Amino acid sequence: MRRLSTVAELRAALREAPRPLGLVPTMGALHAGHVSLIRAARSECAAVAVSIFVNPRQFGPDEDLERYPRSPDADLALLEREGADYAFTPSPEEMYPPGFAASVHIEGPALPLEGAARPSHFDGVATVVAKLLLQAQPDRAYFGQKDGQQVAVIRRLVRDLDIPSEIAALPTAREADGLAVSSRNAYLTAEERSAAPVVHRALAAARDKFRAGQQNAAELEAACRGIIEASPLASAEYVAAVDPETMAPWSGRGPCMLAAAARIGNVRLLDNVLLE
Amino acid sequence: MRRLSTVAELRAALREAPRPLGLVPTMGALHAGHVSLIRAARSECAAVAVSIFVNPRQFGPDEDLERYPRSPDADLALLEREGADYAFTPSPEEMYPPGFAASVHIEGPALPLEGAARPSHFDGVATVVAKLLLQAQPDRAYFGQKDGQQVAVIRRLVRDLDIPSEIAALPTAREADGLAVSSRNAYLTAEERSAAPVVHRALAAARDKFRAGQQNAAELEAACRGIIEASPLASAEYVAAVDPETMAPWSGRGPCMLAAAARIGNVRLLDNVLLE
């Protein structure tokens, strides 16, 4: 595996890479979710690049940029083990040099849910993903369906700016008890960790209702919210049945994503299920 | 010459194009300035694509989008004559389909001068140029130095978003009397047309002072402004000595662009000279 820390090095190395090239953009603190992305890239592509960059522009001023989990040595060992060909680990100064002035602004699927809770978060995501895609020019880039709205935003970004890469979304990796794997799970205390699976349990219960014939968005949202709120440690920030592509409220027909943001103690957890 | 009107057609055609590929993005109404760009591309590249697209997103609500000069038949004939290989003529719906939600926002060199006079103009320019560069993926794209701030904005865009194309800027094409060639010159009445060369005459006079040793930005600006204002038909909207890369006020050292925006009747004309 080659480790590259500047865009010039990355481009020089990738010029010789066999195609198709897969890119897995990450913020490090790699876990089973990332592993499933890397394995998908490995099985579909002739070369696999993984970027590790904790992107300051997608954190709000009061958010957890400073304490976001970082494990560079373990990450690089994992990438070696999983057979990645290139590890790209740029510094913030390499990504945003002095005088940096152009960014991506995105509305549409970026406006509701996380976009409402975290102003400018998705502009930061879209800017760094555009940069990474144009730096590496992969044939395909891999993201986790766990951040379902992020997937919708990135698909919209790629379509609207005509970025010549394909976007693949992979199913959410889960712990044995259903909790969606996330770097931020490390923030949970032992007690909170035992309570956390309620988010997925609530989403799965709503999905059961859907499969049993319930097609009313408000009923599905209320069923999910009720289960989360019944847990003494959890509170639901939002539960929303939305169109998985536009993030607009689900019309009652066609594909539906039921998305939830919940607080367990001070930790904010996201999860979603596709209703089908 | 092949004429293409969708991104899919363009990409399919360019996949077979010899390299290097040169792109000349235009808004049509082609003139001697565009010809010099096409000839430069023709002499430096193995294949030349020219886009013709009057980009609604770079016009303000009170600007001249509707009456902007259009001459599609003459433009295509000119491209044939100049040996362009591909003419890309997308519709507004092809460039901005329903649901379009991602755009480029640019600050830095986009903020003063034209950016102050035309809010959101450069966001519109940056968005369409990013799209065209990512649609065609040229090795090099050609722009006129006549829009010197636009060149600075596009260089910043390409650097900041890591767009893998080189930007070439070519000297301003001028009429025999010095007037910078521009599609908007067609708006001038005969009387205004006779007065219009004052803009370049004023810039050239300031350049003469610079070459004679005047290094004070305010003096150079005042000399230029005085000559424009002395013309009964002309008024200077701004005259500014700036760093050609950042568009910040010129420090008195290093490269300097003296830029002017003037009104001749109801027509707004831009011009600039490099002081060196």
Image (cartoon, coloured by chain):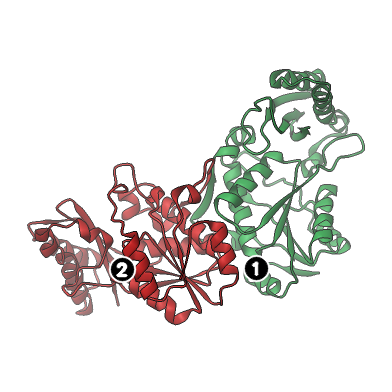
Chain colours: A green, B red
Q: Residues within 10 Å of mark 2 (few under 14, many from 20)?
A: many
Report the front residue among B250 and B109: B109
What residue did someone put label 2 on?
Answer: B257
- Residue B219 placement (x, y as % from top left): 19, 66
> In the image, residue B91 lies at what x, y percent?
45, 51
Quadrant in the picture for the N terminus of chain A: bottom right
Q: Is residue B255 visible?
A: no
Question: Image point 67% across, 39% down: which residue?
Answer: A149
Q: Secondary structure at mark 1?
A: loop
Task: Please determine whether, in this image, residue B183 is positioned above or below residue A199.
Answer: below
Residue shown at the point (78%, 33%) measured from the top left: A273
- For disc 1, the marked residue is A6
Q: Residue at x 76, y 53 (%)?
A: A28
Subunit that carries the residue with mark 1: A
Instruction: Please tell me how crowded label 1 is: few (under 14), some (14-19), or many (20+) other residues with Cα within 10 Å.
Output: some
- Looking at the rendered image, the quarter that the C terminus of chain A falls into is top right
Residue A3 in view in this figure: yes
Where is residue A78 shown, x and y percent of the image?
A: 85, 59
Residue B250: quarter of image: bottom left
